[in-house]
Amino acid sequence: MIDKQTTSRAGALLPHETSARPRASLVGRVVARADLSGERTDQMFGLLSQNFSGVHRQTFVDDLVEKNWVVLIEDEAGVLHGFSTFLMYATRVNGQPLTIVYSGDTIVEPSAWGSSALPRTWIRAVYERRQDYPGGDLYWLLLTSGFRTYRFMSVFCRRFFPRCDEPTPPSEQTLLDVLSHERFGARYERGSGVVRFAAPQVLRDRLLVVPEGRSADPHVRFFLERNPGHSAGDELVSVASLEESNLTLAGRRMVGGFMARDREA
């Protein structure tokens, strides 16, 4: 079991939202965390700082060092417009082997919200690296203080927990509790499913505002009710299977031909 506690946060990246100035021709690429240059790391920190308050350089670096992969979203000139980090690792829950994808710091600048580059690159990166972690089922562990990132789970997954229209089954609740305690220790509040950090990163005001009409979305409304302290940086923990049978149609399209090649191999 992994017992190292982390300070990972996720930000705003809902792929179907658009801004007044959509950014064209964005592409995603995956980089091993160990191969990141100092300049690119500085740019990532700068982008995070622009969209969150309470961002500290050492906290950012500590979180980054713990991850093993980074998804970078860039334009044709190589300018960074978004990124997401993740840790892929093997563990056991109740004696059963599992492979976990744990999402870390994630942000896409508002001008790039209309792009699908991040979700498409992220899910393909996970499936490409799945062969290196053959043990047990594949699960996604997500920690978020923003409704946009929570909503991101429904882009890929038919079932995820907690959610608005179905109580969390005991097996998934056990998985949430075990993985959360494993990663966050006493900072995880078991009853609410929320993690509270001593020095939280908080989305800046323009990203905390729920656009008109979005609160009618049942997933958004559920997130706001389930995590009432999100505006102060409280993080809701969510979990979902990333096995093929649980992918939405959109998730399958983004994965593309990887699943077919896996079946043929």
Image (cartoon, grey):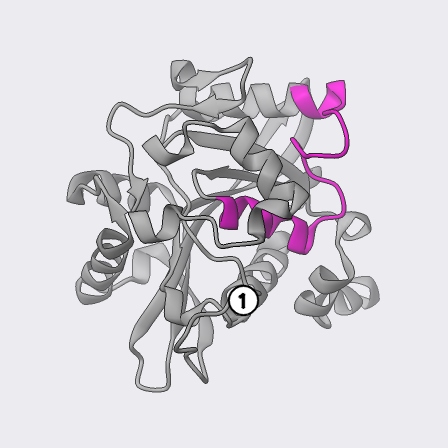
Q: Where, by quadrant of the figure, is residue 141 drawn?
A: top right
Count of marks overlaid on the render: 1
Q: Nearer the viewer, residue 107 or 261?
A: 107
Q: Check the picture and name the quadrant holding the C terminus.
A: bottom right
Mark 1 element type: helix
Q: Position of residue 107 (x, y in %)?
A: 38, 56
Q: Is 102 left or right of 186, judged from the image as shown?
A: right
Q: Nearer the viewer, residue 34 or 221?
A: 221
Q: Where, by quadrant of the figure, is residue 104 drawn?
A: top left
| Residue under the image location 70 percent in, 26 percent down | 172
Q: Is 134 left or right of 149, judged from the image as shown?
A: right
Q: Is 117 left or right of 229, judged from the image as shown?
A: right
Q: Is residue 178 magenta?
A: no
Look at the picture and state if 174 lies above or below 239. Answer: above
Q: Position of residue 121 (x, y in %)?
A: 54, 66
Look at the picture and state if 40 lies above or below 177. Answer: below
Q: Is residue 132 visible?
A: no
- Disc 1 residue type? Thr
Which residue is the site of mark 1? 121
| Residue under the image location 24 percent in, 65 percent down | 40
Which region of the structure is painted magenta?
147-173
Look at the picture and state if 101 lies above or below 114. Answer: above
Q: Is residue 170 magenta?
A: yes
Label 1: few (<14), some or many (≥20) within 10 Å? some
Look at the picture and state if 51 lies above or below 144. Answer: below
Q: Position of residue 221 (x, y in %)?
A: 59, 38
| Residue under the image location 75 percent in, 41 percent down | 159
Q: Is residue 248 visible?
A: yes
Q: Is 185 left or right of 253, judged from the image as shown?
A: left
Q: Position of residue 8 (x, y in %)?
A: 37, 38
| Residue under the image location 18 percent in, 60 percent down | 42
